[in-house]
Amino acid sequence: MFSNYLSSIEDISIYPLIGLFIFVPIFTLWLIYALRLDKKEIEELENLPLDSSTNENNQK
């Protein structure tokens, strides 16, 4: 049903390309950021939900 509407729109094929060109650089930058994170920062983020000192501060 919707394919009939979409196929009648001129230059509709550009939208998937635009989406791809937006997604790939953002994903690549995020991946580089994640791989370059400091190991101590990763451990701190891993233990954040289990850290009792932050839980006590939030309850006050």
Image: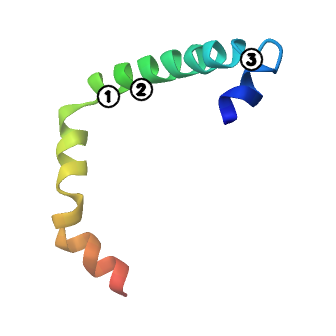
Taking depth in this image into account, of 30 and 22 the one nearest to the observer is 22
Residue drawn at the location 29% of the way across and 22% of the way down:
36
Answer few, some or many: residues within 10 Å of disc 1's Cα (few below 14, many 20 plus, some between 14 and 19).
Answer: few
Count of marks, rendered view:
3
Q: Nearer the viewer, residue 24 or 32?
A: 24
Q: Is residue 47 above or below residue 31?
A: below
The residue singled out by tag 2 in the image is 30
Residue that extends furthest to the bottom in the rendered view of this protein = 60
Give the residue at x 49% y 16%.
24
Position of 57 relative to 48 (above/below):
below
Q: In terms of secondary structure, where does tag 1 sit?
A: helix
Q: Residues within 10 Å of mark 2 (few under 14, many from 20)?
A: few
Q: Quadrant of residue 41?
A: top left
Asked whether, in this view, residue 51 is left or right of residue 2, the answer is left
Would you say 40 lies left or right of 8 here?
left
- Residue 12 badge: 3
Mark positioned earlier in the residue sequence (3 or 2): 3
For the residues bearing labels 1 and 2, Cβ distance under 8 angstroms:
yes
Instruction: Look at the numbered disc 2 and give the secondary structure of its residue.
Output: helix
Q: CA distance from mark 1 to mark 2?
A: 6 Å
On residue 24, the disc is none
Mark pair 3, 2: CA separation: 29 Å
In front: label 3 or label 2: 3
